[in-house]
């Protein structure tokens, strides 16, 4: 009986871990874990979720298990897949063992778009948002190129350096430097619009949104933690640009 309860807790925690690492909101993580526990037993699941760890237990039981959240990124496809699996389990299309195995397999998969497509998307986001913010079509090609280069620097710096916020700083510094060189070479017109468009792929839009949603849902601790992380990321980007302005102006 104890093994079955541990197995249930392991399944719930695996689902929560995948969702937390993929950028899901706290209340969604807790709701999914509790629903799995409720559908697998006649007792209510009790969970406590923070940005760095998840606690899970079953009502009336003394066993509590913990899973750490070492990394956090944005992968909404995994969040959707975990939700689909939990719904299939609720509809009795999957057994607890099958759900556990599917979640373990999903946890080991690295579902990301190919690198070339991510770079292309970063270029498109940079150029189009530059136009939306009032930029000139003449700056569109250089903004796309600078945004793509900045994203490449951010991507590989995050992998190699493994220092939080340093990758954003280096990418922003490179973007600012390239923007100044483009203006100096008379390949662009509006320095500010080029920089604004190029840094957009680095801006933590989803973390800020999730922080607000957590706060509105009453998860004050996680909302403030995520908001602080997003704020520090924004500061790293701003400092990178500010250093460039200090050096060249």
Image (cartoon, helix red, strand yellow):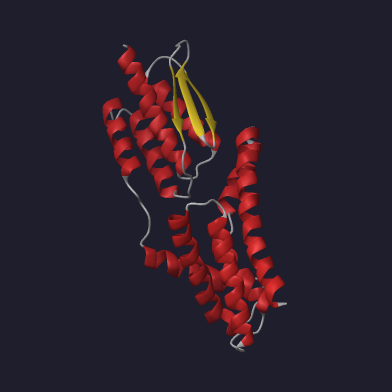
Residue toward you, 84 or 180: 180
Rendered residue at 55%/74% (across/down): 127
In which quadrant is the N terminus drawn?
top left
Rendered residue at 54%/37% (across/down): 51
Q: Does any portion of residue 131 appear in the rendered image?
A: no
Q: Is 29 left or right of 183, judged from the image as shown? A: left
Residue toward you, 108 or 139: 108
In the rendered image, residue 128, in percent from the top left (x then y), is placed at: 56, 72
Q: Is 83 left or right of 221, judged from the image as shown? A: left
Rendered residue at 32%/46% (across/down): 109
In which quadrant is the C terminus drawn?
bottom right
Name the outermost residue toward the bottom. 186
In the rendered image, residue 134, in percent from the top left (x then y), is placed at: 67, 75
Q: Is residue 202 above or below residue 18?
A: below
In the picture, residue 214 is in which quadrant? top right
In the rendered image, residue 200, in percent from the top left (x then y), is placed at: 58, 64
Q: Is residue 74 above or below residue 173?
A: above
Q: Does any portion of residue 173 appear in the rendered image?
A: yes
Q: Is 229 left or right of 89, judged from the image as shown? A: right
In the picture, residue 236 is in which quadrant? bottom right
């Amino acid at each position: 009986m104890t093994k079955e309860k541990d197995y249930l807790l392991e399944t719930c925690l695996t689902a929560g871990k995948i969702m937390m690492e993929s950028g899901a909101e706290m209340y969604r993580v807790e709701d999914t874990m509790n629903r799995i526990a409720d559908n697998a037993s006649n007792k209510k699941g009790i969970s406590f979720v923070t940005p760095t760890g998840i606690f899970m237990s079953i009502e009336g039981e003394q066993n509590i298990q913990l899973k750490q959240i070492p990394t956090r990124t944005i992968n909404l496809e995994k969040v959707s897949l975990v939700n689909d699996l939990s719904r299939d389990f609720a509809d009795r299309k999957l057994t607890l063992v099958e759900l556990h195995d599917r979640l373990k397999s999903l946890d080991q998969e690295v579902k990301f778009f190919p690198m070339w497509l991510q770079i292309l998307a970063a270029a498109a986001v940079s150029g189009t948002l530059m136009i939306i913010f009032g930029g000139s079509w003449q700056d569109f090609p250089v903004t796309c190129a600078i945004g793509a280069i900045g994203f490449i620097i951010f991507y590989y710096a995050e992998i190699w350096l493994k220092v939080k916020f340093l990758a954003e700083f280096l990418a922003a510094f490179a973007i600012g430097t390239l923007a100044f060189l483009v203006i100096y070479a008379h390949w662009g017109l509006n320095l500010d619009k080029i920089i604004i468009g190029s840094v957009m792929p680095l801006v933590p839009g989803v973390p800020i949104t999730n922080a607000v949603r957590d706060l509105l849902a009453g998860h004050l601790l996680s909302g403030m933690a995520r908001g602080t992380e997003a704020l520090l990321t924004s500061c790293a980007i701003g400092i990178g640009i500010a250093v460039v302005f200090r050096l060249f102006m």
